[in-house]
């Protein structure tokens, strides 16, 4: 859902030291890692455009032909750090965004890599990458470090059809949104705190057998039975995009969540009676939902409802009535689009027209 925003909040980026005044000689950098990166940069797609050119064009301050011929410390998106044990510089972070990369990036020898970002902000075609079977372009493949110290992996929209996670025992943050990946094996990721396969055709997600430490979880498709989520007590942010029917009491098992998002769910009812911690709620394309009762969600600050054609009743806590908000209190931020609801009810019996609730001017007859 909010992979990059979550990263900014939690500070999961590498705090790179300043560049030395005198750059170390190229031979001070791990030779195997330099060769892997340079080989990958030389891979071209069917139009003859290389990966290095794609990345350089995304970063205007780099010259296309020279970006990966320069000193390794000046390579776009690459952060090196000096190993104390041998004095060799190794890659600790890679940040490549909005480039349609081709070929195989083999990072199995990158033992010091801790942060890996290879993603696209905007992906056409209903959310899934263009790198699907029969797409005509060489797919992008990724081999992660073996016995690695990798902590953060963001590969949203990268075009991956599979992702092997063996050995990634230090991984805390994994976001694979908008990839044609069907199976995710998280069984060895005991430290995982954030996982998102939003907008993937996921059919199976295997979670660790021990109680997961997940705090943020975004699911897609029919990846697991609803009961799988019931025991995850530490989750604060949860989302599910699926055309399946969830049990009406499903939100009750997420009572500790502050953020919930549901999309495409066919359930005619979702009960939020126990969701007293809820702050953000987003509902998109719920074709059968008829009533939304949030009377117990007094901490609610953001409500977004879009494309719910049968939703005719919305019930909110009396404390969220616009006329009861003091000058120091921010009113409920509301986005309501393509719903037939004409009125909003409150737990104290007050009823406001939708225009009154949204603060729009009411035309006098």
Image (cartoon, rainbow, N blue to C red):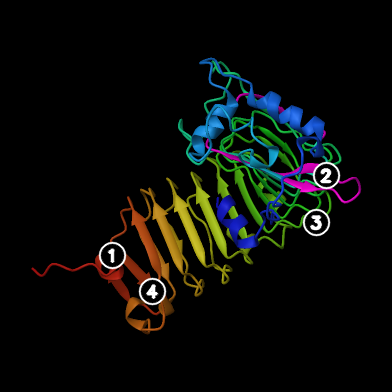
Q: For marks 3 and 4, give the one nearer the viewer.
A: 4
Q: Residue at x 45, y 32 (%)?
A: 124
Q: Are marks 3 and 4 in contact (CB under 8 Å)?
A: no
Residue 340 appears left or right of 363: right
Query: What whole-number distance in Å separates the C-alpha atoms at marks 4 and 1?
Result: 15 Å
Q: Where does residue 271 sit, x and y in percent of width and height?
A: 53, 61
Q: Is residue 61 above or below residue 131?
A: below
Q: Where does residue 262 sit, x and y in percent of width and height?
A: 52, 51
Query: What whole-number distance in Å separates the C-alpha atoms at marks 3 and 4?
Result: 38 Å
Residue closer to the observer: 170 or 190: 170
Secondary structure, mark 1, is helix
What residue did someone put label 4 on? 331
- N-term mark: 4 or 1: 4
What is the crowding at mark 4: few (fewer than 14 residues within 10 Å), some, or many (at least 20)?
Answer: some
- N-term mark: 2 or 4: 2
What residue did someone put label 2 on? 188
- N-term mark: 2 or 1: 2
What is the crowding at mark 2: few (fewer than 14 residues within 10 Å), some, or many (at least 20)?
Answer: some
What is the crowding at mark 1: few (fewer than 14 residues within 10 Å), some, or many (at least 20)?
Answer: some
Occupied quadrant, residue 360: bottom left
Q: For marks 2 and 1, give the one nearer the viewer.
A: 2
């Amino acid at each position: 859902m909010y992979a990059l925003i979550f990263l900014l909040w939690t500070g999961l980026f590498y705090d790179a030291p300043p560049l030395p005044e005198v750059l170390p000689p190229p031979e001070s950098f791990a030779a195997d890692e330099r060769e892997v990166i340079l080989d990958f940069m030389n891979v071209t797609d069917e139009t003859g455009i290389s990966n290095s050119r794609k990345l350089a064009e995304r970063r205007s301050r780099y010259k296309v032909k020279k970006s990966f011929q320069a000193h390794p410390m000046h390579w776009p998106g690459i952060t090196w750090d000096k190993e104390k044990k041998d004095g060799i510089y190794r890659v600790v972070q890679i940040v490549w965004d909005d480039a349609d990369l081709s070929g195989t990036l083999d990072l199995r020898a990158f033992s010091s890599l801790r942060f890996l970002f290879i993603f696209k902000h905007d992906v056409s075609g209903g959310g899934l990458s263009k790198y699907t079977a029969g797409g005509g372009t060489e797919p992008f493949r990724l081999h992660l470090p073996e016995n690695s110290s990798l902590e953060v992996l963001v590969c949203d929209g990268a075009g991956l059809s599979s992702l092997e996670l063996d050995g990634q025992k230090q991984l805390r943050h994994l976001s694979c949104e908008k990839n044609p990946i069907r199976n995710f094996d998280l069984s060895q990721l005991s430290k995982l705190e954030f996982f998102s396969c939003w907008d993937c055709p996921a059919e199976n997600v295997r979670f660790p057998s021990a109680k997961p430490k997940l705090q943020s979880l975004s699911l897609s498709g029919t990846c697991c039975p609803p009961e799988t989520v019931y025991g995850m007590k530490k989750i604060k942010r949860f989302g599910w995009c699926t055309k399946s029917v969830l049990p009406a009491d499903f939100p009750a098992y997420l009572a500790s969540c502050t953020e919930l998002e549901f999309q495409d769910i066919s359930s005619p009812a979702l009960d939020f009676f126990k969701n007293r911690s809820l702050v953000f709620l987003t509902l998109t394309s719920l074709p059968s939902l008829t009533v939304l009762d949030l009377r117990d969600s007094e901490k609610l600050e953001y409500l977004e409802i879009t494309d719910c054609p049968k939703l005719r009743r919305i019930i909110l806590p009396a404390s969220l009535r616009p006329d009861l908000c003091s000058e120091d209190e921010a009113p409920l931020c509301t986005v309501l689009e393509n719903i037939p609801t004409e009125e909003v009810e409150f737990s104290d019996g007050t009823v406001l027209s939708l225009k009154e609730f949204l603060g729009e001017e009411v035309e006098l007859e």
